[in-house]
Image: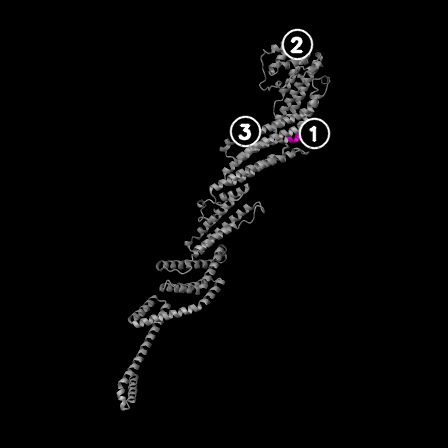
């Protein structure tokens, strides 16, 4: 066999070498020396053989370890590892060699890593720039892991050696910048997450995965710190917390950035601002619910977190707006939005946000005390505004009163000015605005409007009085005085109707009592304005009638003057204008005109301007009076057409007086006078005396007897009779009269 041949060759070689060594006799003495030399050579060869064997074993173990790392089968991996350690444990020397080999391999790996750090940093930088964030983060994690393990080993060997620690830290310095650069990219995606999630949801998911990886590393490092006291620089990164902080800042900026205008550039700036906020918040929350929620792990509770962020940002913004110097309409816009719009179906109550958003569990955007302050400010601003508006409206109306053109008429032909419409339109607008906020404010505003209306009507009354006084100074001016005074009277009726309508529309029935006194007061003021207006118009009439009234009961009148005809024509002419007065006042006006004409006629009798000389004159005068009473009756019946009042009674007084004058038998005079007195019990003695004077045939004694006897007589007045004689004074004889 080959082995035997080798042995034989070896023996032959050995014999040959020994024979060569022992050729001379003196070489025998050196045998011991040769033997020792050969023993050393043999030991050296054996040692080399053993070393070679050890190296082969170490390499074998290394190969086994490497295959272990790539072996997929867990069971096989365990078995091989067990073999390695069993063999290593069985041979102490091999164990040392094995450990040495592993250290060599590790050192070699480390040297390779150290040499490749700049290259890995460059690659990672490129990946970040290309937006391949997951791969970039993977490389960054490898770098951080190498640095952290190296630092940890250094810490374990010598925790006080800061020099070596700093050396490692400095060497891996670029890695920190990489981490910051990657974070910057992540935060840009987070800032635009509501846009990104629509265009590229995968990018957002990658960002969330990176943050989750970092959170796991943070937890691991914190656990190791508890056990060993060591934590690498820059840990914990807390990227999840930073992400939420960035989302919060983004939400705040989004809310603040919606104000495009200022009051100077746009009066509706706040309405616009609030509407943009409403739209943005609703859109964002819908995206968050339908798309964003799917990109985050459930434990992030991203939708509720965002909902809270928006609520908080809105609350802050609304408080900032509430602290500004807002105008009345702006306060209403803000409160209406905060108290109503925010929780309405147009915003947080939107059906697609349900059930995640429960409007009933949302806290108020601003506190009740801030709401109360705003309402208080609104009411005081509104009060001064209403006072200003009413004053301005009245000033504008007064300018119309002096125009040379007639006022406008309504659809029924009644004169009016625009004042009631302007006032109540202004009230309506403010009530509609207040109703946007709540019932309570609406009621407060209504009370305020009616309270200011009360004061305003007093000023209106004073202005109407001044208008009349100015006109009396020069009756030619203003040209359309009568027509505008009619408009003022009609406005009173419009005001009355508008107050009732306003209360019916905006006041709850149970609140009626709180306003009854102010309503009564306003009605009373309006009645006074109308009554004084009517009275001033009748004054106009009677100033024009004065020369004709002065003709009554004079010689000229007895001879056949047409004074009463002129009086009737003048009254009718005025009443053509008065037809433009609304019904309740027009009716009063007709009755009053009728009454005043009769009073002036009786006053003319009592002035004793004529004293009939004989029965003929008495007959002519009395018949004239009866005829003129009939003219008046006809006129006022015509003027009162359709109003249904009794116009007969007043003219009957003239006829009753005429009967006393017409009487031909003086013995029946007492009876006739007593009939007159029983019908009209407010006739005084001086009236009877004047009447008997006009008759012209009663002596002083006769007058005295009749007057004294009448005082005991009974009276039978008509129950509808309104005393008329008490307004008529009888002139007494004065010195100038006697001298005549």
Residue that carries the numbered disc 1 in the rendered image: 476
* Rendered-image quadrant of the N terminus: bottom left
* Relative horizontal placement of residue 399, taking residue 102 as reference (left or right): right
Q: Is residue 436 above or below residue 738?
A: below
Residue 581: tell me if it is visible: no
Q: Position of residue 86 (x, y in %)?
A: 30, 69
* Relative horizontal placement of residue 447, taking residue 589 as reference (left or right): left
- In three-dimensional space, the C-alpha distance between marks 3 and 2, rounded to whole angstroms, equals 54 Å
Residue 438: tell me if it is visible: yes
- In three-dimensional space, the C-alpha distance between marks 1 and 3, rounded to whole angstroms, equals 37 Å
Find numbered disc 1 in the image and state the secondary structure of the residue it sits on.
loop
Compare marks 1 and 2 and give the one earlier in the sequence.
1
Residue bounds of the magenta highlight: 476-485
Q: Is residue 273 above or below residue 117?
A: above
Residue that carries the numbered disc 3 in the rendered image: 520
Q: Position of residue 176 (x, y in %)?
A: 45, 62
Foreground tag (1 vs 3): 1
Residue that carries the numbered disc 2 in the rendered image: 700
* Rendered-image quadrant of the C terminus: top right
């Amino acid at each position: 066999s080959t082995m035997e041949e080798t042995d034989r060759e070896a023996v032959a070689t050995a014999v040959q070498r020994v024979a060569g060594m022992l050729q001379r006799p003196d070489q025998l003495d050196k045998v011991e020396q040769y033997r020792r030399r050969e023993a050393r050579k043999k030991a050296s060869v054996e040692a080399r053989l053993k070393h070679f064997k050890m190296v082969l074993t170490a390499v074998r173990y290394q190969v086994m370890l490497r295959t272990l790392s790539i072996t997929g089968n867990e069971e096989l991996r365990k078995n091989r590892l067990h073999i390695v350690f069993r063999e290593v444990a069985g041979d102490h020397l091999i164990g040392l060699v094995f450990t040495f080999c592993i250290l060599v391999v590790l050192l070699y790996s480390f040297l390779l890593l150290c040499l490749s750090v700049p290259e890995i940093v460059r690659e990672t930088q490129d990946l970040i720039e290309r937006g391949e964030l997951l791969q970039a983060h993977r490389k960054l994690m490898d770098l951080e892991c190498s640095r952290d393990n190296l630092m940890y080993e250094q810490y374990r060997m010598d925790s006080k050696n800061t020099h070596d620690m700093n050396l490692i830290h400095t060497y891996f310095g670029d890695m920190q910048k990489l981490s910051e650069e990657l974070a910057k990219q992540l935060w840009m995606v987070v800032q635009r997450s509501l846009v990104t999630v629509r265009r590229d949801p995968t990018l957002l998911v990658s960002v969330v995965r990176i943050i989750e990886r970092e959170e796991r590393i943070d937890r691991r490092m914190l656990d190791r710190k508890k056990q060993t006291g060591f934590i690498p620089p820059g840990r914990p990164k807390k990227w999840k917390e930073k992400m939420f902080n960035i989302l919060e800042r983004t939400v705040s900026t989004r809310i603040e950035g919606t104000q495009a205008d200022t009051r100077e550039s746009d009066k509706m700036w706040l309405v616009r601002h609030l509407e943009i906020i409403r739209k943005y918040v609703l859109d964002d929350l819908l995206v968050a619910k339908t798309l964003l929620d799917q990109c985050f792990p459930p434990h992030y509770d991203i939708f509720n977190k965002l909902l809270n962020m928006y609520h908080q940002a809105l609350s802050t913004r609304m408080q900032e707006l509430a602290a500004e110097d807002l105008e009345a309409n702006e306060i209403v816009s803000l409160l209406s939005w905060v108290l109503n719009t925010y929780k309405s179906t147009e915003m947080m109550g939107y059906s697609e946000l349900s059930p995640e958003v429960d409007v009933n569990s949302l806290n108020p955007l601003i506190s009740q005390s801030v709401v109360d302050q705003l309402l208080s400010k609104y009411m005081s601003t509104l009060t001064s505004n209403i006072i200003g508006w009413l004053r301005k409206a009245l000033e504008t109306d007064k300018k119309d009163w002096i125009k040379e053109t007639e006022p406008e008429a309504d659809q029924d032909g009644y004169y009016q000015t625009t004042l009631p419409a302007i006032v109540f339109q202004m009230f309506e607008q403010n009530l509609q605005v207040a109703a946007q906020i709540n019932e309570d404010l609406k009621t407060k505003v209504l009370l305020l409007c009616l309270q200011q209306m009360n004061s305003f009507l007093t000023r209106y009354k004073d202005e109407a009085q001044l208008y009349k006084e100015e006109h009396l100074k020069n009756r030619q001016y203003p040209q359309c005085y009568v027509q505008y005074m009619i408009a003022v009277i009609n406005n009173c009726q419009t005001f009355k109707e508008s107050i009732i309508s306003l209360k019916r529309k905006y006041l709850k029935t149970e609140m009626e009592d709180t306003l009854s006194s102010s309503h009564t007061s306003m009605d009373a003021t309006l009645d006074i304005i109308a009554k004084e207006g009517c009275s001033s118009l009748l004054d106009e009439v009677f100033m024009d009638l004065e020369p004709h009234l002065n003709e009554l009961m004079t010689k000229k009148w007895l001879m056949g003057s047409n004074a009463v005809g002129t009086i009737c024509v003048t009254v009718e002419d005025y009443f053509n204008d008065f037809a433009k007065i609304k019904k309740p006042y027009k009716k009063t006006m007709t009755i009053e005109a009728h009454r005043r004409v009769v009073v002036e006629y009786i006053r003319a009798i009592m002035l004793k301007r004529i004293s009939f000389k004989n029965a003929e004159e008495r007959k002519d005068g009395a018949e004239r009076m009866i005829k003129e009473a009939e003219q008046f009756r006809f006129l006022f019946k015509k003027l009162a057409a359709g109003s249904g009042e009794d116009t007969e009674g007043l003219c009957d007084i003239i006829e009753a007086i005429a009967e006393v004058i017409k009487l031909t038998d003086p013995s029946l005079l007492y009876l006739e006078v007593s009939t007159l007195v029983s019908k009209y019990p407010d006739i005084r003695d001086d009236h009877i005396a004047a009447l008997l004077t006009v008759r012209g045939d009663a002596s002083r004694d006769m007058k005295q007897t009749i007057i004294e006897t009448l005082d005991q007589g009974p009276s039978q007045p008509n129950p509808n009779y309104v005393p008329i004689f008490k307004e008529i004074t009888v002139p007494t004889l004065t010195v100038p009269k006697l001298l005549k």
